[in-house]
Image (cartoon, helix red, strand yellow):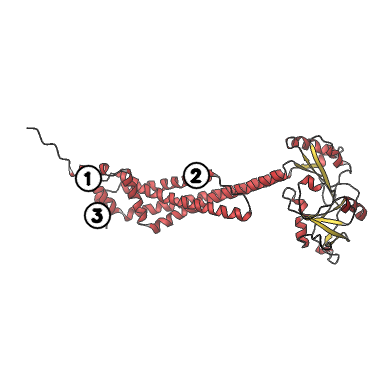
Amino acid sequence: MSAAPARPSPRARLSPRARLSPLDVLSLGLEGVRGRLGRAALSGLGIAIGIATLVLVTAIPASGQQKLLDDISALGTNILVAQPASSPDNPITLDPGAPAMAGRIGPVEHVSAVANVHQTVRRTEYVGDTLSTGITTLAAPDNLLTTVHGRIASGRFLDPSAAAHPTVVLGSQAARWLGIAEVDPNRPARLIDVGGTRFAVIGILAAMPVTPELEQAVFIGWDAARSTFGFDGRSSVVYLTAEESQIEAVRAVLPATLDPQTPGLIQVSSPSEALLAKRHTQNTFSGLFLGLAGVALVVGGIGVANTMIVSVLERRREIGLRRALGAARGQIRVQFLIEAVFLAGAGGVIGTLLGLAGTLGYTLLQGWPVVIPPESVAGGLVGAVLVGAVAGVYPSIRAARLPPTEALSTS
């Protein structure tokens, strides 16, 4: 007679290792979050703030940089500006033939020059000198806008016929200071006082981000400057464009071309490089804000850890009951670890959405292209999950180590 098969013990029949699937453990972990939604929301808030800040401080500078690069690309990266090193007390000018000499450099495409004629600009002759706006008066040839990629916002620029008469074109900032918004060709020209002489305003320039110094100036014709103010034809600043691949070669020979006697006095700069340097400085500050975002993320992680520790203390009887029914320590650890990761992950998702919404709103308000670095979004989400995992390690271990008898005896 064969022996009857052994009956499994009650502990074996109830073994969670045989009855709890990973999905069951996941459900238990999420149940702890659903039962304490208010506390969970406050815990995830710190993570959300950190991730939102992370997305904002990477996406907004990236969008601004793309706008800057688009502007530079449209306006040209091949502009050079050359001028003698001088001071207000000792102004130095270039020989009248210097711009023409620069035009003979092979890769140079366009050359223009301006000269400061040192005349006060006033809205009317009745405004005292002490109320002068400090606008610069520049004598300019008719090809200046072609060289610096400038545009007319209203009216027209100096042409050969207008350049010989007392006519003036205003830079965009100078026009705002003088309170002149537009030029209407169907109405009599607006008159302003330049050096005690009335000049008719015939045009206003658009903003010039590559050469912002020209925005604060007014421009009169070369011939008008000679006849009205005794201008001697010596220019103060030379602007030129050259083949982009040859820009450094032109920069190297330009000082000696403009001033063979003292080439060391000639300063040559590229406005686009100055703009990029400015953006680099802004990126340095963005790095600081990125560090602050990291601090916020760590603080959020501490909040998650604190919430999980309190949760373990509140649920000691639940933990003891599960352990008494055969739940393994590993399952308890995983349950509480899932809660911590879910809290941090949910905060990361909400923070990412807030960061994206803030970036979209700001860039649309500024008129910038929207650029969202994918690494910041992915890095933020991964960082949130990692912070949650680290924050949940100690509470989950503490929960798993609770002896069932001690946990069940807790009131």
Q: Viewer-proximal residue, 110 or 57?
A: 110
Q: How many numbered circles are shown?
A: 3
Local SS, label 2: helix
Q: Viewer-proximal residue, 94 or 176?
A: 176
Q: Nearer the viewer, mark 3 or mark 2?
A: 2
- Name the amino acid type tagged 1: Leu
Q: Is residue 239 left or right of residue 56?
A: right
Mark linked to residue 14: 1
Q: Which of marks 3 and 1 is in front?
A: 1
Give the quarter of the figure containing the N terminus: top left
- Compared to residue 195, the image places residue 284 above or below, namely above
- The residue shown at (91%, 55%) is 229
Mark linked to residue 319: none
- Name the amino acid type tagged 2: Ala
Give whichever of discs 3 and 1 has the lower sequence position: 1
Return the x and y of residue 378 as percentages of the image width and height. Answer: 50, 44
Mark linked to residue 378: 2
Circle 2 packing at 10 Å, graded few (<14), some (14-19), many (20+), is few
- Name the amino acid type tagged 3: Ser
Q: Distance between the residues labelled 3 and 2?
A: 45 Å
Q: Is residue 381 left or right of residue 85?
A: left
Residue topped by disc 3: 409
Q: Distance between the residues labelled 3 and 1?
A: 22 Å
Return the x and y of residue 269 as percentages of the image width and height. Answer: 75, 43
Give whichever of discs 2 and 1 has the lower sequence position: 1
Residue 155, quarter of picture: bottom right
Whether tag 3 and tag 1 are in contact, CB under 8 A, the answer is no
Local SS, label 1: loop
Q: Viewer-proximal residue, 234 or 245?
A: 245
Give whichever of discs 3 and 2 has the lower sequence position: 2
Q: In this view, does 316 lie to the left or right of 292?
A: left
Return the x and y of residue 95 as percentages of the image width and height. Answer: 88, 43
